[in-house]
Amino acid sequence: MSKRTATKPAAKRRRKRSHAVSNKWSTYQALDVAFLGIPEEFILEEMAIWSWSDTPHGDLWCDMSVTLEDVLKDVGLDAKERKFVWPDAGRLDLDKSVRRINQQHPEFPEDQITEFLVFWIRSLYVPEGCSDSQMEELERLTERWVADLGMAEN
């Protein structure tokens, strides 16, 4: 019978904690490294996106979204002429539409209203009864409009 050699248990190591990094991040980092293989940059980006709504800008955007989606529910768009078609005010360009909304909702800054209207043009406005080719033309016109405004997505 061979003699077993006694081995000492490995010394426990204390984890160093960075004061700049939260304990929550340590958990995400551990999952990233140990199980998921997700790059650290991706985790940080996701955390920033999910915490954005807790910022003043994110909070304002959420309030604006709820309000302005309701305001815009009956508004049409003439992308060729770059006009919003208001049922009670006729055809208004972007600047006049921004001023109109700001008069009704002075708690929303004009630059944020502009940003929301561009988002609405690009992502939320979907006219009823359009064919695929009409939707493609609308998308082409709205992308050109947004690009000319200097607000194209990167």
Image (tube, rainbow, N blue to C red):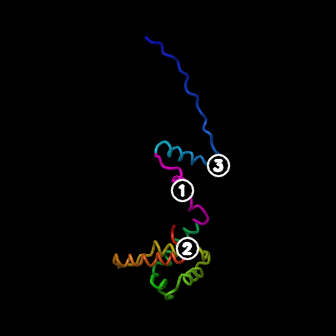
CA gap, disc 1 and disc 2:
22 Å
**Amino acid type of the residue tagged 2 in the rendering:** Glu
Instruction: Indicate the position of residue 151 as horizontal and vertical percent values.
Output: 54, 73
CA gap, disc 2 and disc 3:
33 Å
In the picture provided, is 141 more to the left or to the right than 8?
left
Span colored in magenta: 36-58
Instruction: Indicate the position of residue 59 as horizontal and vertical percent values.
Output: 58, 66
| Residue occupying the point 48% across, 13% down | 3
| Residue occupying the point 52% across, 52% down | 43
In the picture, residue 100 is in which quadrant? bottom right
Label 2–label 3 contact, CB within 8 A = no
| In magenta stretch: residue 56 | yes
Q: Main secondary structure of the magenta part?
A: helix
Q: Which residue is mark 3?
A: 20
Q: Which residue is mark 1?
A: 45
Q: Determine whether the residue tagged by mark 3 lies in a helix, strand or loop.
A: loop
